[in-house]
Every structure is written in C-alpha cells, then in structure tokens.
Image (cartoon, rainbow, N blue to C red):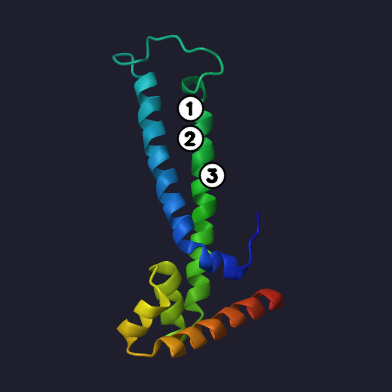
Amino acid sequence: MRCSIQEQVKSYQQMKDNLDYLEYKLILSERELSRWEDSDDLGDIKLEAGSKASNLENIIASLKEEIEYKTIILNNTIEVVSKFTGLNNQILRMKYIEGMTLSDIALQLNYSVGYIQQRHGEVMRTLKVMKLEGI
C-alpha cells in the first residue's frame, strides 16, 4: 500500500503507535518461543500442527518484516518534514510528529491561530505539489 506524502505526514502518530504495538507483540512472541524451546518450561509439550505456538517462528519473521517496513515509512516521513525549514518545519513537526493542535502550536510559538492555520494550509499544498513532482 503506497500512500501520498500528505497521508504519510498526517498519519505519523498512528503509524508510530502501531509500530510500538508491533514491537511489543514481537517481544511477547519471542518470549513465548523461548519458553517452547526450553526443555525446563514448555519444551517437552507436543505441539499440534497449525497451532499458534507451532507457527511462532513465522509470526516473528512476519512481525520483523512489518516493523522494518513501518520504520522506513516513519523515517521517510521525518525526512520529508526536515526538508522544510523555519516555521513550516515547526508546524509540521509539532502537529504531525508531536501531535499538537494548531491552536497549541500558535500559543507556543507566539503567533495567531489564523496565521498558523494559513501557514499550515500552505505547507499542505506544498506537500501535494511535492507528490505531483515526485519529490
């Protein structure tokens, strides 16, 4: 699934939360696998074909692939945001990476809410143009 630059930036927080969850699932799966491999723990129990436990190695490999893919997307998103400088960079970073509202950004940066909304709109249009130009 390929999404636009705008969609990547807008969904950064959601992707980050999803990545954190996948990493948590990976830790749990690796712990469970080690229990099944330990003869002092679950290692002596016969696994049924098709059970979750018998498929843990595949689950772990799949989780690692998904984590790697999502990490690349997150890093690309940060790279796109870093292409902007000054106030535009601050607005993108604070809104989409830090999850702040435009009102909170305006308050923190000592600008009017209307001005921050206007600049945000300009930045989002620039992102759309970047997508069209393949940047």
Amino acid type, label 2: Ile
State the residue at coordinates (39%, 90%). Answer: 112
Residue under circle 1? Answer: 56
Amino acid type, label 1: Leu
Residue under circle 2? Answer: 60
Q: Mark 2 near mark 1, Cβ–Cβ under 8 Å?
A: yes
Q: Is residue 85 visible?
A: no
Q: Which image quarter holds the C terminus?
A: bottom right
Amino acid type, label 3: Glu
Element at label 2 = helix
Residue under circle 3? Answer: 65
Q: Position of residue 21 (x, y in %)?
A: 41, 46
How packed mark 3 is, by other alpha carbons closer than 10 Å (few <14, some 14-19, many 20 or more), is: few
Query: Residue 13, labelled with which disc?
Result: none
The residues tagged by marks 3 and 1 sit, at their Cα atoms, a distance apart of 14 Å
Upstream in sequence: badge 3 or badge 1:
1
Q: Position of residue 126 (x, y in %)?
A: 60, 82
Q: Position of residue 35 (x, y in %)?
A: 34, 22
Q: Position of residue 108 (x, y in %)?
A: 31, 82
Is residue 21 rendered to the left or right of residue 2?
A: left
State the residue at coordinates (45%, 90%). Answer: 115
Number of marks drawn: 3
Is residue 131 rendered to the left or right of residue 11?
A: right
